[in-house]
Image: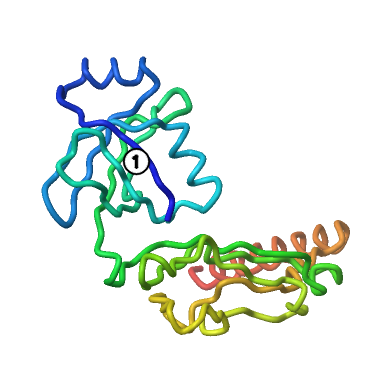
Amino acid sequence: MSVLTGKIREANGKSAARKLRTDECIPAVVYGLNDNVSLSVNPKELNKLIEAKGRNVLIELRVDGDKAENRNVVLQEFQTHPLKPGWVHIDFLEIDVTKKIKAKIPVVLIGVSPGEKQGGHVNHIIRALEIESLPKDIPEKIEVEMGEIELNQTVHVSDLKLGESVSIINNPNDVVVNVHLEKVKEEKPEGEEAEGDAAASADSKDDAGKKEDGKN
């Protein structure tokens, strides 16, 4: 389990949050199992954990000044600055590591499909799947080996095997990725198109003339 340290945040409000960010920290909150805790964490340390083990990394949070020695948490939500890179606020969810939780896992395509080499187009339809498992078994990503996908072949959710400890919640019949030739719309030569338009115009005038004759 990855370890992240933090400090209890005594002051709240916009001015206190701005001061934290000036000190290269970001405000955060922990909720879930027990009491809610306001704290601050170092964004660089959190970034390292995510880059190493993914967005759903299981974290042992050790907060200076907290009555609990440590808390097992996952990154639940985060707010980013609208104009510049960086986080504004982090929500951590405290969990029971003995109980299953739900998480969204990115789907990553690995390699090149033989069908793509034959001119096929890769349609990556589902880019994240919802799974349920014990926190320790949550995968960093779900890989699809494209080297095994032929032209006109489709990969469904039911085709993905993540082991007995991980259950996929998405509909088994949903399409994750497929490789197909794109349909090319046939275009008439310019001469034929012009002749067709002229014929259609002449037919329209004849119909109009017949209607007029009928009235007389």
Q: Residue at x 26, y 50 (%)?
A: 71
> Which element type, helix, strand or loop, lies under badge 1?
strand
- Above or below residue 193? Residue 155 is below
- Above or below residue 18? Residue 28 is below
Q: Residue at x 27, y 36 (%)?
A: 28
Q: Based on the displayed image, in which of its 4 quarters is residue 171 positioned?
A: bottom left
Q: Is residue 90 left or right of residue 105?
A: left
Q: Which residue is most to the left? A: 35
Image coords of residue 123 (percent x, y): 64, 66
Q: Give amino acid for label 1.
A: Phe
- Please name the colour scheme applied to the rendered image: rainbow
**Front residue (pair 162, 178):** 162
Image coords of residue 203 (percent x, y): 69, 68
- Above or below residue 207? Residue 148 is below
Image coords of residue 139 (percent x, y): 49, 65
Image coords of residue 14 (percent x, y): 21, 20
**Front residue (pair 204, 197):** 197
- Above or below residue 112? Residue 68 is above
Q: Residue at x 26, y 31 (%)?
A: 7
Residue beneath disc 1? 78
